[in-house]
Amino acid sequence: MRKTLYALSGLAFATAAAVLPTAPAQAAGGAWGAIAVSDYGDLGWAWNYDTEDEANQAAVDKCAKASCSVITTFPQCGAAAFSNSMNKYTGGYGATPEDAEANARWYPDSTIVRTAICND
């Protein structure tokens, strides 16, 4: 069963993080998720897709802006955090939502976690 959440408008002044972390190992059972963000802070995310490419495309589609790009893909859990000082989003992944949130906080002031989701 595929699940997606539709994009949420983010902070109008936010810019996307263009830096992507190293891709995680392939998900067991084919479950993949992804989070995408636009230059304006619009987020789109998807989970429980059969392939990483399908999850990436679904997240970008849900983000629904021309500037949307994937900030993280994940076989287990993924998260997006916002840094006020850097004025951008960063993504992270991990075995639990807490791990994903911690890995998404690349900067000391990345205290605003916008989303943390896991594959079923």
Image (cartoon, rainbow, N blue to C red):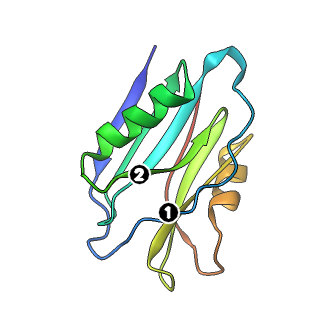
Tag 2's secondary structure? strand
Q: Residue at x 47, y 46 (%)?
A: 35
The quarter of the picture where the C terminus appears is top right
From the viewer's perspective, is residue 53 above or below residue 23?
Answer: above
Name the spot of residue 40 as percent of width and height, x first. 29, 66
Residue type at tag 2: Ser
Which residue bears the numbered disc 2? 69
Residues marked 1 and 2 touching at CB (< 8 Å): yes
Name the spot of residue 34 as percent of width and height, x first. 51, 40
Q: Residue at x 66, y 54 (%)?
A: 21
How many marks can you see? 2
Name the spot of residue 9 as percent of width and height, x first. 26, 58
Q: Residue at x 57, y 73 (%)?
A: 111
Q: Is residue 100 left or right of residue 81?
A: right
- Other-residue count near label 2 (Cα within 10 Å), few / some / many at <14 / 14–19 / ≥20: many
State the separation of the CA atoms marked 1 and 2.
Answer: 8 Å
Which residue bears the numbered disc 1? 18
